Image (cartoon, grey):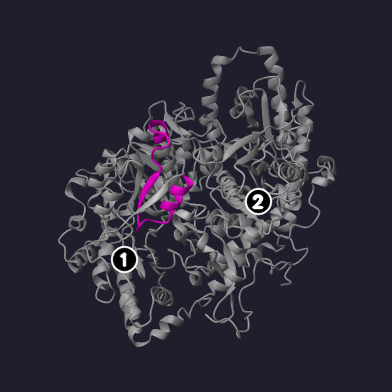
Amino acid sequence: MKQSGVAPRDDSPPTIFERSRPGRRGVEPPPVPSGLPELDDCLPAELLRRDPIGLPEVGELEGVRHYTMLSQRNMAIDTNFYPLGSCTMKYNPRVNEAVATLPGFRKAHPLQEAWEIQGWLDVFWRLERLLAEISGLPHVSLQPAAGAHGELTALMMIRALLEEREPGARRVVLVPDSAHGTNPSSCTIAGFSTREIRSGKDGTVDLEDFNSKLGDDVAAMMITNPNTLGLFEPRIGEISRALHDAGAYLYMDGANMNAILGVARPGDFGVDIMHFNLHKTFSTPHGGGGPGAGPIACVDELEPYLPVPRIERVAPTAGNGASTDENEYRLCEDFPRSIGKVRSYLGNSGILLRALAYIMAHGPEDLRRISEAAVLNANYLRVRLRDEFHLPFDAPCMHEVVFTARRQKEHGVRALDIAKRLIDLGFHPPTIYFPLVVSEALMIEPTETETLQTLDAFCEAMRTIAVESREDPERLREAPVLQPVKRLDEVAAVKTPILVCACEDGRS
Amino acid sequence: MAYVQHTDDDIRAMLRAIGVDSLEDLFESIPRDMRLDRPLRVPPARTEREILSHFQEVASANLSLDDVPSFLGAGVYHRFIPAAVDYLASRGEFSTAYTPYQPEVSQGTLQAIFEYQTLIARLTGMEISNASMYEAGTALVEATLMAYAIHGAGKTALISEGVHPEYRHVLETYFRNHPVRVETVPVGEDGRTDTSALRGGDVFAFVCQSPSFFGVVEDGPALRQAADRLDPERRPHLIVAADPISLGILAPPGSYGADTVVGDGQALGNDPNLGGPTFGFFATRASHVRKIPGRVVGETRDRDGRRGYVLTFQTREQHIRRERATSNICTNQGLCCLRGAMALALLGESGIRRAAEASTRLAHFARDRLCELPGVKEVFAAPFFQEFVLELPVPARPLYRKLLLDGVRGGLPLERYFPERQNQMMFAVTEMTTPEDIERLRDCLERHLRGASATRGSKQGAGKRARRGAAKKLAKPRARKS
C-alpha cells in the first residue's frame, strides 16, 4: 500500500470540528435562572477552567446533517446482509426499542429505593428465570456488561471457590486453540495462566491432548460449544466428567447459543457455568460495538459466589406480573462468599429489558425454531458454496460455517480481498482470519432472520468472486472501489498515530 | 415463528439442497442423550401488541424521575438531552451495525468515535482517549491495571474515600486475586482527600475523584504533589475520576498533571436507564497509547489519499495478544458513547458551560436555602460542584420516603454506603432543577422536620400502606411543569 506520491484529496467529509464557527449556538440547555449566587461566589477562581474547552460550535441543523451523513457511511443489519461470523447479526426487532424507551424504564435511577423500581426488578427476575430454563443452569446473574465481562466474572467465581477449598493449588485454565481471544485474556485478568488444547483433525477438541494437559493444577476449562468452527463438541460429556473427576470446572462461552436454543442445554451436557451474549442470541442491537450484556448462569455449587446485588422475590406475583401492591422483589447484597460487585449499580438494564421482550415474543416452539432456521441457513450456505470454496472441516455445521480462501490464494487472492470485493457487491463481509487455527478463514454466520432469496443472492456474489479470482484477481485486490473510501493504510495509522482531531473552529 | 421469514416451501427446498429429510436431522452432530427431549418451559409467544401492553404495565410499577422533582444523583443524573440525540442515535445505520472491523463500510461509526475521542480529550485536558469502556467503575479498574503495567515497580494503589463507593467496590473485586494491594485514603473534615495521610513506598497509583462522591471539588495540584512526594523519582500515576459536565467549568485534570482521567458518560446524552447501559470514558497521555485498554480509532489515508479512519493499535488487544493482553475488553459502549458525542457536539462549547454553571449555581442556592432550616447543617466545608451533604436532625432514609409521598424525591440517604452517616442526605442539583423545585423541597423538608419533633414515632404503621398508595398514584404519568 504505497502512500508516497499521492496528493491528499480534500473531498472527504468535514469533521464536526471543521463545521464549527466561533459564536454559533447549538441546542441550548435550560437558561440559568435569575437570583442565584454568582459563579465566583460558588467556586474559587483557582478551581475553574481558564481556557476554552475546544468543543464545536455548530447549529442544530448542521449537527443533524453531520450525524445523518455519518450514518449513511455505515453498513448495518438494517441496510445489508451482515454474515459476520461469531457475532450473530440477526434482525433487531423494533418493538424491543419501543419497550426500552418507555419513560418508566429509561427515566429510572439506580439508587431509588427498591419499592420505587418494582417494575424493573420484575424484568430482572423474569429474565433470570428464563435464562435458567434455557441454559439448564439454575442460578443467574445479570450483572456483567458484556460477554468478556461475563467470562471474567465466572472465572473470579471459580477462583473464589477454589481458594476456599484448596488455596493456591489450582492456577491453570485449559483453553482450546480455537477459542475467542477474550477467553485467555480473561484468564490473565482473573489471575490464572492458560494451557492451550489442540484442535483435532475434525475441528473439535483433541481428547488425547486434553487428557495429557489435565492435571491437579487445573482450575477449569473454557469451551465454546458449538465451537468457533461451527461444530458441536461431541465429546463434551466426557470432557466434563474428566474435569469433575479431577476437581476442576467446565466453563462455556455462550457466544454460539443461537445454534442450540431449545435443542440442547449446557446444564444438561455437563457445563458448570456459562455466559450469554444477549446482543447475539437475544437480538439486542450491536450499536456499532456495544452496549451488550453478558449474564452468567451456574450450578448450585457456584451459586454462593455470584456477584452482588442479587434479586430476591419475597411475594408471589399477582397475575400479569405488574405488582405495585406489595414489595414483591428486593435487592440483596448480603452474600458473604460473593466475589462482590463487578460493575457499578445494577447491570446493563436497558439491554436486559430488550432481551426479555425478545424472548417473550417466542414460545417454546419458536425459540427452538430460531436455532433450527439458523442451522438450516448455515448448512444451506455450506452446500451451496462448497464447490467453489474450500471447507477445512467438511461436516454438517451448526449456526455458522467456516470456509477458507485456499483455492483463491493460488491466484494471489486472500480472504481479505474476498471480504473487500463482497462489500462492493452489497454484502457485509464475514469474519476473516478467525478462528486462528484455520488459515485464510472466512467465517460465515447467516442467522435465522434472512430469507432464502438473500442467501441465494449472497451465494451468487460469492460465486462471482470465485470466478473473478481466477479470471481477474487484480479486481479483487483493488476492491472496494464503490465505497466512500478505498482500502485504508493501517500501517501509517500506527506509524504516525493521529488519535484526535488537530483542527479547531473550522480552520484545519 | 416470530422473526424467521421462511415459508414451509423455503424450508423444504433448503432441506432438499442440504440433503437431509427434516430439521431434526440438522442436529445429528449433537449426541442424542444430550438433546432436550421436551419443549422449553417458557410462557407462550406473545404478539407485538401484547408485549407492548405488558411492558407498559410493568413500566408503570416504576416511579420515574419525571414523576416528581428529584434530588438523587451520586453518579447518575437527570440531565438535559437535546431531542435530536434520540432521533439520530436510533437510526438503524448506527444502532444495527457492529464493531467497525471493515473500515470501508464503517466510516460513519469510525469518524464518530474519532470525534468522540477528540471531544473527551479536550474535555479532560488529556492527549488521547479510547473508544469508551463499560462504565466508570470498570474504567477505573482498567486505569489502575494500566498504571500497574506502566509503572512497573509499585504494588500498592491508594484510593481516596472520596471515590464513589460503587467504583471502589468494583476495584476491590478485581484486585482480590491480584498482587496489587488497594489501600483507602480517608477524606478530611472538609470532605477533601486527606493528603497528609498518604503513606507507602511502593505506590504506583493514587486514585481520586473530583468532584468527589460527596460532591467536593478536590485541590488538583495538591493531589499531584502528594503523589509525587511519595516517590519523587518513579512518580505514581494520578488517576482522576471526573464528572464530564463539571469539566465545562472546572479545571480539567490534565491541567494539574493527571496521568489518566476516567468517568461515567451517562451525563452526556444518556438517560439514567437505571444506571446502565452508560459508558465509561478513558483519557490518558499519548505516551501510553500502546498500553491503553479497549478500542482506539486513528485517522489515516486511503489508496487515493482520501482521509479515513480505522481501528488502530489492535496488537494491544485480546483478539491478537490473547493471554498477554493487558485487558480482556472486546467491545466499547458504541451507541452510548455516540450519544455522548452527539450531546457534546449539539450543546457545544457554550451549552456545556451553561449546563455546568447552572448546576453549580442552582446547587449553591439549594444549599443556602436548605441550611436556613433549623437543625440542618452542611457536612463538608470544601467547595462543591453540584452535590452537597447535609446533616439532618432525623435519620435520612425514613425521611426520603416521607418526602416522596409529599411529591419530592430527596437526596441520597448516605446510610446506603456509610452506615455511620445515618442522618446525612446528599442532594444533587442539575440544570434540570428549577428554583421552584428547590422551594418545594425546602417546604416539604421544613414540614417534616417540624413534624418530626411533634409526632415522632406515631405514624409507624401507616407508613407502609401510604407508601403503596403513593407508588400507585405516583406511577401514573403526570405532566411536570417546567
Q: In which quarter of the image is residue A22?
A: bottom right
Disc 2 element: strand
Q: Taking A406 as reference, is A120 left or right?
A: right
Residue at 43 percent across and 50 percent down: it is: A147
In the image shown, does A140 or B66 lie closer to the viewer? A140
Say whether residue A167 is magenta.
Answer: yes
Are the residues under marks 2 and 1 on the same chain? no
In the image shown, does A50 or A178 lie closer to the viewer? A178
Question: Which segment did they paint magenta?
Answer: A161-190
Residue density around tag 1, few if under 14, some if 14–19, many if 20 or more, within 10 Å? many
Q: Name above or below for residue A421 compared with residue B315.
A: below
Chain of the residue displaying label 1: A
Q: Does residue A233 appear anywhere in the picture?
A: no
Chain of the residue displaying label 2: B
Q: Name the residue under label 1.
A: A402
Residue density around tag 2, few if under 14, some if 14–19, many if 20 or more, within 10 Å? many
